[in-house]
Image: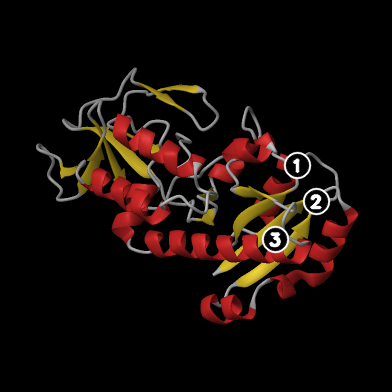
């Protein structure tokens, strides 16, 4: 497993310690227990905070990403990269960085273990702008909002979400296949496709940095972004004129087709 930490700090001593110490910030017992391949990056004050980390995500596709910041950076929250604020009032720089790296190593490792079974992965990668379910939406919002809170019962909440999503998984009543589909409140059926034939678009046009990052990370963890969901009706009827939401909030109107290819970040092709 691989994790990249990105530091956003203006204070020279913090930047100097982070840049020089690197792996030395990780306690020996954590290194030995989790066997993580770490990378450490320091924000050089340009380009923008979100552009810098989006470029790193693009260049390091098999790494999980976490940011450590001196101040609250809404731009990181907007692109979907988890981050923690440094609390240096009661701790030394060394103690605080070690504390946060330890916390995030454990949390990202827990996410990775949860994603390992295919049944969990296909549930947790659902395109959440288009999968309409109030309980799932509220649960996901709670998980992402409190993800960096060390007192948050993350594993409990994630398992509760998985349990709920499994209750929404059924075979089609009229279908000729035994595949199971996640069925949302509008009756759309989402099946995690076995085939890899559609190409995801993340840059150019009206795409933004969130389109790029969300196509590569979920809960800070990298995922295979070549597979997509097939979205259809229970009757396998035409989706003509049905409307969906694209990866950057754009409206997508389906043509005369029986299914749409939809990626986890809601890109539709």
Q: Secondary structure at mark 1?
A: helix
Q: Which residue is mark 2?
A: 43
Vertical position of residue 205 compared to residue 224: above or below: above
Q: Residue furthest front?
A: 90
Vertical position of residue 219 compared to residue 17: above or below: above
Q: Which residue is mark 1?
A: 49
Measure the C-alpha gap from mark 1 to mark 2. Answer: 7 Å
Q: Secondary structure at mark 3?
A: helix
Question: Which residue is at a point 14% across and 40% down the rendered structure image?
Answer: 172
Percent coordinates x, y for residue 140 in the rendering: 40, 40
Percent coordinates x, y for residue 221 in the rendering: 52, 56
Indicate left or right for 208 with 155 as reference. Answer: right
Question: Which residue is at a point 86% across and 51% down the rendered structure image?
Answer: 11
Question: Which residue is at a point 80% across and 51% down the rendered structure image?
Answer: 43
Classed neighbour count for the residue bearing mark 2: other residues with Cα under 10 Å, few (<14), some (14–19), many (≥20): some
Q: Earlier in the sequence, mark 3 or mark 2?
A: 2
Give the numbered dot on residue 216.
Answer: none
Q: Would residue 194 be visible to someone looking at this image?
A: no
Q: Quadrant of residue 137?
A: top left
Percent coordinates x, y for residue 200 in the rendering: 52, 43
Q: Secondary structure at mark 2?
A: loop
Q: Nearer the viewer, mark 1 or mark 3?
A: 3
Q: Quadrant of residue 117?
A: bottom left
Measure the C-alpha gap from mark 3 to mark 2. Answer: 18 Å
Q: Nearer the viewer, mark 3 or mark 2?
A: 3
Query: Is the Cβ of the residue at disc 1 closer than 8 Å to that at disc 2?
Result: yes
Q: Nearer the viewer, residue 261 or 68?
A: 68
Image quarter hosting the C terminus = top left
Q: Which residue is mark 3?
A: 96
Q: Earlier in the sequence, mark 1 or mark 3?
A: 1
């Amino acid at each position: 497993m691989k994790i990249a930490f990105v530091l956003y700090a203006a204070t020279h001593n913090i930047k100097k310690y982070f840049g020089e110490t690197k792996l030395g910030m990780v306690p020996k017992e954590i290194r030995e227990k989790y066997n993580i391949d770490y990378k450490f990056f320091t924000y050089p004050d340009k380009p923008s905070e979100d552009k810098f980390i989006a470029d790193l995500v693009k260049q390091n596709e098999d790494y999980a990403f976490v940011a450590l910041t001196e101040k609250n950076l809404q731009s990181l929250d907007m692109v979907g990269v988890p981050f923690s604020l440094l609390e240096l009032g009661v701790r030394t720089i060394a103690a605080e960085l070690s504390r946060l790296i330890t916390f995030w190593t454990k949390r990202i490792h827990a996410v990775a273990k949860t994603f390992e079974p295919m049944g969990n992965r296909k549930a947790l990668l659902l395109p959440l702008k288009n999968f309409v379910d109030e309980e799932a939406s509220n649960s996901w919002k709670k998980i992402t909002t409190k993800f960096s809170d060390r007192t948050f019962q993350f594993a409990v909440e994630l398992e509760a979400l998985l349990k709920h999503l499994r209750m929404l998984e059924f075979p089609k009543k009229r279908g000729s296949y035994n595949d199971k589909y996640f069925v949302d409140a509008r009756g759309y059926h989402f099946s995690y496709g076995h085939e890899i034939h559609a190409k995801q678009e993340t840059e150019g046009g009206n795409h933004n940095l969130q389109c790029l990052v969300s196509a590569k990370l979920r809960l800070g963890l990298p995922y295979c972004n070549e597979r997509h969901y097939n979205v259809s009706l229970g009757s396998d009827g035409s989706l003509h004129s049905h409307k969906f939401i694209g990866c950057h909030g754009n409206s997508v109107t389906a043509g005369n087709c029986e299914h749409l290819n939809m990626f986890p970040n809601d890109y539709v092709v």
